[in-house]
């Protein structure tokens, strides 16, 4: 879907922001770029939609060089969500969401349907919110509008540059949950920049840890937690050794399930590693105790358990 082939970026002052970057981001993947300040993650993101021109190498989207796309066409087909929400203050919510569809000359009826559909998708009643101005919304609601505006013209790719970092912790956690659920429904290719490892573990299908413009390790949340490639990754993820902490599957069960099952079950006595192994085959599995189904567990619940354990470990230090 998105391929980086020996991509480098050097700024006029001599700063090498990205160095010989080789990476493939798969279609429909929620891919996270993370690293300390100055690691090159935002520069990498902005090169995808040519907000920053690369110095060397090539970026491909669907096998075509980004330099071969018409610039306006490229950007219209890539949604972009910033930390600074940047809604137009003088325009209504409906008008804000409609900006790109109008540029693409969609019919008014189609735009109106799309606005209502997107607002409902993020839990905002169209009748209540679409005629309001941004100043009449909370920070969290404004950021939801920022997300749906990026989705308005139904782009294949969504770029998100630390979109939730300016929000209070409660709004931020809610939007993280919303984004995970939204991605399951829309299955876009999302490239998400953050400096928060807990956020990365929660939302990412795969995570790329960067340092000094280079890739240190790419992997799933489980791979990074259990198989860090070096001390930098260990330190960046957190000092807590999750494998030594007690695990009780009953603590992460949901009483209801979100999708049909094909009979895969695990016992409630399963270890964390056994549960992770089962979830590598299915998104959600049944859990049994004494021959009866007592609940369901999914990948997101396990990742949240690991994040919560990490928080507890940090508090105890």
Image (spheres, rainbow, N blue to C red):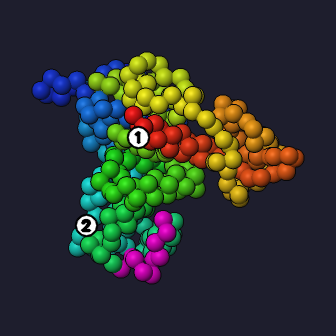
- The reply to whether residue 124 is visible in this rendering is yes
> Start and end of the magenta stretch?
122-131
In this view, the residue farthest toward the front is: 316
Residue 100 in the image, given as x and y percentages of width and height: 36, 61
Mark 1 secondary-structure assignment: helix
Left or right for 283, reference 311: right
Of all residues, the one furthest to the left in this rendering is 13
Q: Quadrant of the C terminus?
A: top left
| Depth check, front residue: 221 or 218 | 221
Q: Residue at x 60, y 42 (%)?
A: 302
Q: Quadrant of residue 279?
A: top right
Earlier residue among tags 2 and 1: 2
Identified at 74% across, 52% down, the residue is 295
The residue nearer to you, when weighing 134 against 224, is: 224
Kindly report which numbered mark, 2 or 1, lies closer to the viewer in this rendering. 1
Numbered circle sitting on residue 315: 1
The residue that disc 2 covers is 88
- The residue nearer to you, when weighing 274 against 96, is 274
Total tally of numbered discs in the picture: 2
Q: Position of residue 123 (x, y in %)?
A: 49, 69
| Structural crowding at the residue carrying mark 2, measured as other residues with C-alpha within 10 Å and reported as few (<14), some (14–19) or many (≥20) | some
Where in the figure is residue 42, as x and y percent of width and height? 30, 38
Magenta highlight on residue 93: no
The quadrant where residue 304 appears: top right
Q: Is residue 58 visible?
A: no
**Percent of width and height locating residue 103:** 34, 62
């Amino acid at each position: 879907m998105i391929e980086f082939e020996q991509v480098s970026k050097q700024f006029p002052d001599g700063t090498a922001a990205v160095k010989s970057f080789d990476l493939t981001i798969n279609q429909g993947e929620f891919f996270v770029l993370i690293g300390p300040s100055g690691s090159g993650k935002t520069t990498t993101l902005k090169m995808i939609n040519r907000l920053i021109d690369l110095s060397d190498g090539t970026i491909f989207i669907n096998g075509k060089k980004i330099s071969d796309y018409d610039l306006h066409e490229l950007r219209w087909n890539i949604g972009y969500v910033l930390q600074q929400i940047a809604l137009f203050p003088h325009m209504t919510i409906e008008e804000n969401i409609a900006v790109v569809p109008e540029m693409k000359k969609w019919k008014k009826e189609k735009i109106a349907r799309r606005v209502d559909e997107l607002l409902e998708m993020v839990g905002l009643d169209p009748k209540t919110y679409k005629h309001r101005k941004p100043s009449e919304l909370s920070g969290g609601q404004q950021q939801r509008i920022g997300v749906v505006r990026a989705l308005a013209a139904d782009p294949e790719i969504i770029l998100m540059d630390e979109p939730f970092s300016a929000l209070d912790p409660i709004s931020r956690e809610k939007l993280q949950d919303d984004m995970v659920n939204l991605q399951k429904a829309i299955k876009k290719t999302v490239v998400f920049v953050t400096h928060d490892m807990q956020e990365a573990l929660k939302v990412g299908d795969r995570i790329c840890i960067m340092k000094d413009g280079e890739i240190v390790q790419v992997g799933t949340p489980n791979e990074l937690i259990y198989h860090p490639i070096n001390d930098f990754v260990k330190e960046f993820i957190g000092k807590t050794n999750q494998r030594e902490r007690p695990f009780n599957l009953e603590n992460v069960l949901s009483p209801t399930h979100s999708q049909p099952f094909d009979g895969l079950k695990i016992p409630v006595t399963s270890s964390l590693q056994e549960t992770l192994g089962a979830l590598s085959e299915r998104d959600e599995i049944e859990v049994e105790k004494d021959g009866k189904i007592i609940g369901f567990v999914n990948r997101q619940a396990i990742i949240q358990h690991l994040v919560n354990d990490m928080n507890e470990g940090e508090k105890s230090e």
